[in-house]
């Protein structure tokens, strides 16, 4: 092939490649609550350190009973204050987060602030591999559980508060799992992270990436619209072999809109929410 033909073909190939990428990006989604089974990696059901933790009062006795068939594993952690009976609570949800057909654990660890039920939460991801579990989370001592308050810097904790009670909607055409979570109404971070939050795996960051459900025409918006009508599949202790559906609750969105859009709301005035509010949601607020 002579040099003149090569020079001509280069821009043509670039255009074809761009067109292919654009087509892939705009390919129709096939959203479903029928989530295919993943398979567990070899080795222990839970990360090794959980079998080595000191078993305190009513704490971590549940670890030994975890089986490879459990979609959810969890129970009480350590007591926050001796004699208070206020325990951390840890729940492992089995989800294929990165679409490789190997099960991962989405860990939700909550810490009570008082006997009234107010609490904080931190999430840790354990990604299943051919050789066991890879941890993604804020730094904690190796001999401690992945709970709030164990020498975790505020900056690290900020990056690992995804949400409680995760559920999944899958795009069967790409095998991308969209994780939907929210912070419950007694959670301290609910005011800085209101509403349902939609995440997808980010291979570059090797973590979950928050998507903007308010962006018109976006994939997150389509997932959110599907969730409102059909709910999302959630791992549950009540496993029957069929998906358990977590239904959309309108009051979760109502709280988000009131917090952001109301004249006395937090929009534009809270350091906590600075940079977290969707520009598309703000534009919607102004229209109404």
Image (cartoon, helix red, strand yellow):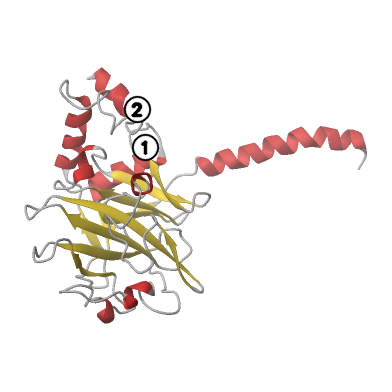
Disc 1 and disc 2: Cα gap in Å? 9 Å
The residue that appears at 32% across and 49% down in the rendered structure is 162
| Label 1 residue SS | loop
Q: How many marks?
A: 2
The label number, if any, that marks residue 266 in the structure image: none
The x, y position of residue 98, in whole percent, is 45, 58
Q: Which residue is mark 2?
A: 280
The x, y position of residue 27, in whole percent, is 49, 44
The x, y position of residue 197, in whole percent, is 30, 44
User: Is 32 displayed left or right of 16 in the figure?
Assistant: left
For residue 21, which quarter of the picture?
top right
The residue that appears at 16% across and 35% down in the rendered structure is 254
Q: Which quadrant of the figure contains the C terminus?
A: top left
Q: Which quadrant of the figure contains the N terminus?
A: top right
Q: Which residue is mark 1?
A: 212
In this view, the residue in front, 48 or 241, is: 48
Q: Residue furthest right?
A: 2
The residue that appears at 34% across and 53% down in the rendered structure is 152
In this view, the residue in front, 187 or 142, is: 142
Marks 1 and 2, the one that precedes in the sequence: 1
Residues under numbered marks 1 and 2 in contact, where contact means CB atoms less than 8 Å apart = yes
For residue 77, which quarter of the picture?
bottom left
User: Is 122 displayed left or right of 47 in the figure?
Assistant: left
Is 63 rendered above or below residue 187? below
Is 188 rendered above or below residue 215? below
In this view, the residue in front, 69 or 146, is: 146
Q: Few, some or many C-alpha atoms within 10 Å of disc 1 (few <14, some 14-19, many ≥20)?
A: many
In this view, the residue in front, 236 or 162, is: 162
Q: Residue furthest top?
A: 287
Q: Few, some or many C-alpha atoms within 10 Å of disc 2 (few <14, some 14-19, many ≥20)?
A: few
The residue that appears at 14% across and 40% down in the rendered structure is 251
């Amino acid at each position: 092939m002579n040099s003149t033909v090569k020079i001509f073909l280069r821009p043509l190939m670039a255009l074809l490649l761009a067109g292919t990428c654009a087509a892939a990006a705009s390919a129709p989604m096939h959203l479903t609550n029928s989530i295919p089974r993943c398979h567990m990696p070899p080795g222990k059901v839970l990360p090794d350190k959980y079998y080595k933790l000191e078993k305190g009062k009513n704490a971590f006795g549940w670890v030994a009973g975890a089986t490879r068939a459990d979609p959810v594993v969890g129970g009480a952690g350590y007591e926050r204050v001796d004699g208070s009976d206020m325990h951390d609570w840890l729940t492992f949800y089995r989800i294929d987060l990165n679409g490789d057909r190997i099960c991962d654990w989405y860990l939700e660890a909550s810490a009570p602030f008082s006997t009234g039920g107010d609490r904080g939460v931190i999430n840790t991801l354990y990604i299943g591999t051919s050789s066991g579990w890879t941890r993604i989370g804020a730094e904690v001592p190796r001999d401690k559980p992945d709970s709030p308050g164990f020498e975790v810097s505020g900056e690290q904790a900020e990056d690992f508060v995804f949400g409680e009670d995760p559920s999944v909607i899958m795009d069967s055409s790409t095998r991308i799992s969209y994780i939907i979570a929210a912070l419950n109404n007694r959670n301290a971070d609910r005011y800085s992270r209101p509403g349902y939050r939609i995440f997808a795996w980010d291979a570059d960051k090797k973590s979950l990436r928050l998507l903007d459900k308010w962006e018109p025409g976006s994939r997150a918006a389509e997932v959110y619209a599907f969730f409102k009508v059909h709910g999302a599949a959630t791992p549950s202790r009540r496993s029957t072999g069929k998906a358990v559906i977590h239904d959309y609750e309108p009051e979760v969105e109502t709280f988000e809109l009131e917090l952001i859009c109301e004249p006395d709301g937090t929009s534009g005035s809270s350091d906590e929410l600075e940079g977290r509010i969707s520009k598309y949601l703000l534009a919607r607020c102004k229209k109404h």
